[in-house]
Amino acid sequence: MTSHKKNLDQNYWDMQYIDNNTGWDLGKVSPPIKEYIGTLKDKNISILIPGCGNSYEAEHLLNEGFTNIRVIDIAPTLIENLQKKFKNNPNIQIILGDFFEHQADYELIIEQTFFCALPPTMREQYVSKMHQLLSDKGKLIGLLFNKTFESGPPFGGSQSEYEQLFEPHFEFLQMDLCQNSIKPRANCELFIEFQKKDLK
């Protein structure tokens, strides 16, 4: 495990699931992401959910008829649970692994409490990896915290920070304060829809 991951390594995240210490877990698909999924016409697009947690977004996608979903997380206990939950479903692939070592090509990546779980020192790496994993004109959509926290995870941030961070790699189609967040996160979430820039 490289030093920049501090103590937020595989063992740390696995213990959160073993101890059921998952305060970030909404117990359902986040309303802004659910609303966005409702606008998608092509049910066969390739979708990745990194740092997937209990994968309510994936469950919703499957219920809506999407056929090409991958979820990835570093916590073995969680992945074991997901394999049982989605047993024998050919439309989802469940991967135990490190997002930063993952290699594939996606038309859509869904961000839901993964970015904020990473130490801020890894944010530039996150942006370049997202860019690498997306196909031409691929999109990164989801939620980022629009607030700061005394310590993390979660690690927060501001719209101006995110603009500076993502602008070299992405076109901003949307970055707006959510109007339909769950109550505890009201006025604290930005909905993002970023399209991959061609850097050639």
Image (cartoon, helix red, strand yellow):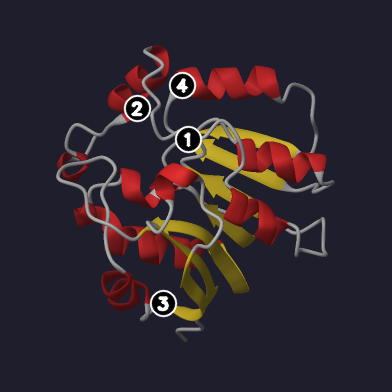
Question: Residue placed at 61% from the left, 50% from the top?
Answer: 31
Q: Nearer the viewer, residue 199 or 181?
A: 181
Q: The residue tagged with tag 1: helix, strand or loop?
A: strand
**CA gap, disc 1 to disc 3?**
24 Å
Q: Give the side of residue 50 with respect to residue 69, left or right.
A: left
Mark 4 residue type: Pro
Considering only vertical position in the picture, is 35 above or below 97? below
| Outermost residue to the top | 19
Question: Residue placed at 43% from the left, 26% from the top?
Answer: 75
Mark 1 residue type: Asp
Mark 3 residue type: His
Q: Are marks 4 and 2 in contact (CB under 8 Å)?
A: no
Q: Position of residue 167 (x, y in %)?
A: 37, 80
- According to the picture, the residue beneath numbered tag 1 turns out to be 73
What is the number of the mark on residue 94? Answer: none
Question: Residue placed at 74% from the left, 21% from the top?
Answer: 87
Q: Are marks 3 and 2 in contact (CB under 8 Å)?
A: no
Q: Are marks 1 and 2 in contact (CB under 8 Å)?
A: yes
Mark 2 residue type: Trp
Q: Give the side of residue 75 with respect to residue 83, left or right.
A: left
Task: Identify the mark nearer the N-term, 3 or 4.
Answer: 4
- According to the picture, the residue beneath numbered tag 2 turns out to be 13
- According to the picture, the residue beneath numbered tag 3 turns out to be 169
**CA gap, disc 1 to disc 4?**
8 Å
Q: Nearer the viewer, residue 8 or 60?
A: 60
**CA gap, disc 3 to disc 2?**
29 Å
Task: Identify the mark nearer the N-term, 3 or 2.
Answer: 2
